Amino acid sequence: MSTLLEAEGITKRFAGITALSEASLQVGDGEIVGLIGPNGAGKTTLFDCIYGYLRPDAGRVTFCGEDLIGRRVHTRARLGIGRTFQRIELFTGTTVRDHLLVAERARQGTGGLWRDLRGKGGPTSDEQERVDAILDLLELSALAERPVEALSLGRARLVELGRALMIEPRLLLLDEPSSGLDGDETAAMGDVLTRVSQEREVAVLLVEHDVELVRSVTTRLYVLDFGTLIAQGTTEDVLGDEAVRKAYLGST
Ligand code: ATP
């Protein structure tokens, strides 16, 4: 398996607080890798350094061998990095289909966003087909014309995932996709992530608190605690590690 993403020695400080200290991780082509750790451990900070929202104070990030430091967020998206967020950001009054169409227009880089979809530049059949394929993959076809506010949180999270998939990423950065979901919705999310990764040949770096979800979808794990990597390895080994259980799972 070839390396897709490599973050090496990432350090990030905020006003004297070291949020991350020399953290390194790798994600291979098509792999689903977890990044776990207690609240405030630095997981989102590492995501932001990889995605380009934050510039690390030290360290390197490469994707498909290309140096990402200093590259803008949209360049990273064009290279094939998609992302979803902990806090859901959807637009009320617009449909599931519209959300995906806007993401498709953004991928094309033609600058046509909401205004175009609503005004002169209606979607082409090619755009509709691409959106239909993602709706089908995520089992959202029956809900395509619903306004997003009519959806359950679980479905809304799938719309976010769909949006990220429209850019045809090779790597998805998912920040707590189970946040706010109940047990059934979380299990369904796990099935979707596995299917999406396999069918679209997309690698996933997953920040997640739900241990069962982590166990069911990831093959490897990294554990952050107070900004430092304290463990890495196969999911089974890491979840069985005593130091990890103490720091993260709260058991002795
Ligand atoms: P959670 O699981 O709660 O989302 P996390 O592991 O994602 O936590 P981060 O959000 O990366 O943790 O935060 C790591 C540390 O950096 C925390 O101490 C946090 O307060 C601090 N921090 C994060 N962003 C900023 C910022 N913009 N300014 C100052 N401090 C920050």
Image (cartoon, grey):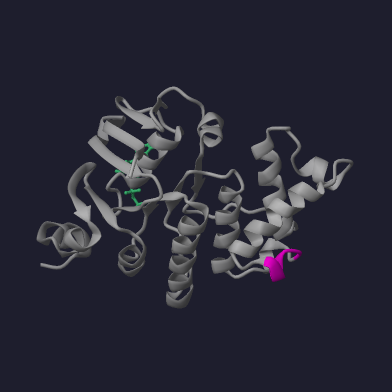
Residue 131: give x, y in percent of width and height.
Answer: 69, 54
Q: Is residue 61 above or below residue 177?
A: above
Which residue sits furthest top? 70
> Overall secondary structure of the magenta stretch?
helix
What residue span does the magenta drawing correspond to?
A: 141-145
The residue lying toward the viewer, choosing from 150 and 4, is: 4
Left or right: residue 10 versus residue 150 is left
Locate residue 222 relative to residue 75 in the image: left or right: left
Q: Residue 129: percent from the left, percent from the top?
A: 73, 54
Asked whether the viewer can see residue 92, the reply is no
Asked whether the viewer can see residue 30, the reply is yes
Q: Relative to 238, does residue 69 appear above or below in the rendering?
A: above
Question: What residue sits 50% from the left and 46% below the top?
Answer: 83
- Residue at 65% x, 61% y: name it: 135
**Quadrant where the C terminus lies?**
bottom left
Rendered location of residue 116, percent (x, y): 82, 41
Quarter of the render that holds ligand 1: top left
Q: Foreground residue, 107 or 125?
A: 125
